[in-house]
Every structure is written in C-alpha cells, then in structure tokens.
Image (spheres, helix red, strand yellow):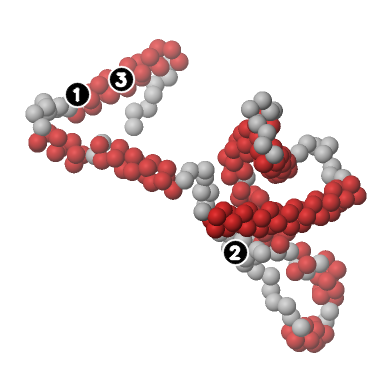
Amino acid sequence: MEDEGRDVQLEFRSLIEEIATHTNQVREKVKALSQQIADDPPNVNKGLSILEVKYHAFLEYLIGITYGMIIKVNGMSLQKNSLIDLIVENRTIIERIRPIEQKLKYQMDKVLKAARGDLSADDPLRFKANPDLLVTKGEASSEEELSEGEEEDRQKSDSKHSVGTYVPPKLVSMPYEGDLSLAEKKAQKEARIKRHLMTSTLLQELKEEYTDAPIELVDTDDIIKAKQHKRAKEKQESVGLFFYSITVS
C-alpha cells in the first residue's frame, strides 16, 4: 500500500510539473497575442464574423473550465458559483454554431485554399480570365502596320519565347453535398426506392394475385368520354362569352 501511495504521489507531482510548464508556454503566447491585438486592433464596425464568435466562446469556455478546476483543487464547492452558468452558456453557443459553420464550410475552404495557393488545375477559382495572356489594342494595331516580311521575322523571334496560347479551362461541376450525413442520405434513398416499389405496376399485380382484396377495374372509355364532354362544354362556354370558337386539334 505504501508503494502504491508513493507511486501516486510521484505521478501527481509529474503532472503538476507538466501543467506548470504548459501554463508558462500559454502565458507567453497570450502575452504576444495581446500585444498584437493592442498594436493592430480588429475592425468590428460591421460586427463579428462567425469564426470570431466561435473563438471567443471557446476561449471563455476553456477559461471557465480551468477556473473550475482551480476551485475544485483548492477544495471549494461550485454549487452556488455562477461559473457553471457561464460554462453552459458558452457550450450552448458552440453547439448552435456547428450547423451554421457546416453550411459555410465550402466557402471557407475556398477562401483558405486561395490564400494558401493550393488550388488545383480544375478548381473553379481558376476559371476567371487572365488579362495578361490577352493581346492588347496597341499590340493589335502595331501588328496591322507591319509588312509581311517584318511580320514573318517577328513570328520567328516570338516562337522562340512563346508562352503558349491561352486556353480557358473547362467548367467542372461542383456537387453540393448538403448538410445531411451519410446515414441520412442512405435512409432517404431507401425511402424513395420503397415509395417507387409501392406504386409500381408489378407490385399492384402481385397484390391482386396473392391477396384477397377486391380487384379495382378502371374503364378507360368512360375517362375518355368524360374528357371529351368537358372539352365540348368549354368550347360552348367560350363561344357564348367571347364569340369565338376553340380550334379542335
């Protein structure tokens, strides 16, 4: 028992030392970040972005948990402390932001790729025209003034340093995956297949063959006669109201 207690004490002491080391590192980073914000304060005239709201909520959430750990380590109770309400509030904000962030994920990924320069050849952000590869008006007018011999000499010299003809890339459709998970998409697909099978002619024939339910017979002649009667009635009403006859096709 004494050996186990000594091992627990040593492990606890090593954890405390590790916490102290990481705390010093975090303190230095927070100081640098605070100085950066003081030197260049962010512009909040148009409000905060959703990512800034998320970061603030995460920061307050972590601060609350850390402060709660300090209170518990000192042997005090959190029963009447308003810290629990703060933690729950920030946790609720973080959970409510998740579906909004998922809807904006595609746009945020495009912006991040453009900032890092990680765009592929088929990326839609590369579809915009590059004016640098087009011939300007000055170059076009000067080409018209050149003689045939001068133009041939210029073409020979330009062929050595040619950068190639600008060819616009083909448009590639980008599917929108939506907010549904893989399981929800699979469930919707199965539901569509089930509805299609329930309304199929083969299933209706099997029902009529193997069930005791009465067979429903539909007289197509009556349906055609009803449509013809309705058409004749509409024609008669149009003649009486507007004094013109509907052409029968």
Residue 134 in the figure: left or right of residue 87: right
Q: Which of 183 and 80 lies nearest the eye of the viewer?
A: 80
Residue shown at 61%/48% (left/top)?
A: 105
Q: Which residue is mark 1?
A: 222
- As shown in the figure, which amino acid type bears the numbered disc 3? Lys
Q: Which residue is mark 2?
A: 122
Q: Can residue 194 be seen in the rendering of this structure?
A: yes
Q: Can residue 111 be seen in the rendering of this structure?
A: no
Q: Earlier in the sequence, mark 3 or mark 1?
A: 1
Residue 4 in the figure: left or right of residue 246: right
Image location (x, y in percent) of residue 112: 69, 56
Q: Which of 225 and 245 lies nearest the eye of the viewer?
A: 225
Tag 3: Cα neighbours inside 10 Å, few (<14), some, or many (≥20)?
few
- As shown in the figure, which amino acid type bears the numbered disc 1? Asp
SS of the residue under disc 3: helix
**Where residue 10 is drawn, which disc sits there?**
none
Tag 1: Cα neighbours inside 10 Å, few (<14), some, or many (≥20)?
few
Count the marks.
3
Residue shown at 47%/45% (left/top)?
A: 181
Residue 40 in the figure: left or right of residue 229: right
Mark 3 vs mark 1: in front? 1
SS of the residue under disc 1: helix
Q: Which of 48 and 176 lies nearest the eye of the viewer?
A: 48
Q: Which residue is mark 3?
A: 230
- As shown in the figure, which amino acid type bears the numbered disc 2? Asp
